[in-house]
Amino acid sequence: MRKPELAAAIAEHADLTKDQANRVLNAVLEEITSALNRKDSVTLVGFGTFVQRHRGARTGKNPQTGEPVKIKASNTVAFKPGKSLKDAVN
């Protein structure tokens, strides 16, 4: 499912227009992004938790040549699914 399809599903379930649902979805995604940017976690009870994680610098290897390659430190986003989501998938 892509973003426009998700917005259409939200519109159908919440009795909104597609434009209104798209604005709501964009607002939710922007708030999650800004919270993660502030290093806050975002917990949606029953669904899961988004957290920012730091990856330290490390040495990898080039798969073609086997030579060591330095990989810079970076931040990434992790998602831990909640119990309800796990149960729904399984």
Image (cartoon, grey):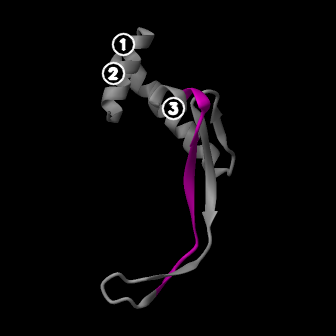
Identify the residue under disc 2.
Answer: 8
Q: Position of residue 28 (x, y in %)?
A: 53, 32
SS category of the residue bearing label 1: helix
Q: Is residue 54 above or below residue 28?
A: below
Among the two numbered marks 3 and 1 on one chain, the one whose residue lies closer to the N terminus: 1
Name the image quarter holding the N terminus: top left
Q: CA distance from mark 3 to mark 1?
A: 18 Å
The reply to whether the C-beta atoms of the residues labelled 1 and 2 are less than 8 Å apart is yes
Horizontal and vertical percent position of residue 25: 46, 29
Q: Amino acid at mark 2?
A: Ala
> How far is the residue under mark 1 from the one under mark 2?
6 Å
Q: Look at mark 3 in the image and give the residue it sits on.
A: 27
Residue 24: % across, % down? 47, 25
Q: Give the residues in magenta.
A: 69-85
> Which numbered disc flags the more N-terminal residue, 2 or 3?
2
Q: Are marks 2 and 3 in contact (CB under 8 Å)?
A: no
Q: Residue at x 36, y 20 (%)?
A: 9
Q: Is residue 89 left or right of residue 18?
A: right
Q: Determine the image quadrant of residue 54.
A: bottom right
